[in-house]
Image (cartoon, helix red, strand yellow):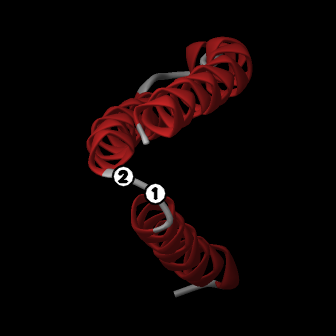
Amino acid sequence: MDAGIIGAIIGGIFGIGGGIIGTYCSITNTRGPLERAFMVRASVVAWIAISVFILLVLLLPNPYRFWMWLPYGVLLPLGIMKINRGVARIRALENTAD
């Protein structure tokens, strides 16, 4: 194997490992059952969406694979902001219930 393939494999392992650790921390650092359920759903959607993106980048021919970065670069930050707003809304709801 050449260095590029080895780097891709090692990079992929570190990327997936980081995603697993980040998902675990996001779920375990929730403050209540509603927030935990929301974060589990958000994590599943994020894993599916990012997996579809990676598959499209790997499987589409040039130049279409490069065009996939445009929606990814826009939708990923928007998704993160939506998740953060959802968590804030749930925290505010759970704080008023106390």
Expressed as whole percent of the image width and height from the top left, the position of residue 33 reads 27, 49
Q: Looking at the image, which residue is at 61% across and 31% down?
A: 88
User: Is 10 above or below relative to 4?
Assistant: below
Q: Looking at the image, which residue is at 57% across and 30% down?
A: 92
Left or right position of 44 against 42: left
Expressed as whole percent of the image width and height from the top left, the position of residue 17 reads 48, 76
Q: Looking at the image, which residue is at 67% across and 17% down?
A: 78
Q: Residues within 10 Å of mark 2 (few under 14, many from 20)?
A: few
Expressed as whole percent of the image width and height from the top left, the position of residue 41 reads 28, 36
- Asked which quadrant contains residue 22, the reply is bottom right
The residue wearing badge 2 is 32
Mark 1–mark 2 distance (CA, rounded to whole Å): 6 Å
Expressed as whole percent of the image width and height from the top left, the position of residue 14 reads 57, 78
Mark toward the viewer: 1 or 2: 2
Q: Are marks 1 and 2 in contact (CB under 8 Å)?
A: yes
User: Is 1 above or below relative to 48?
Assistant: below
Instruction: Depth check: give the residue in front, 25 or 61.
Output: 25
Instruction: Depth check: give the residue in front, 23 or 32.
Output: 32
Mark 2 belongs to which amino acid?
Answer: Gly
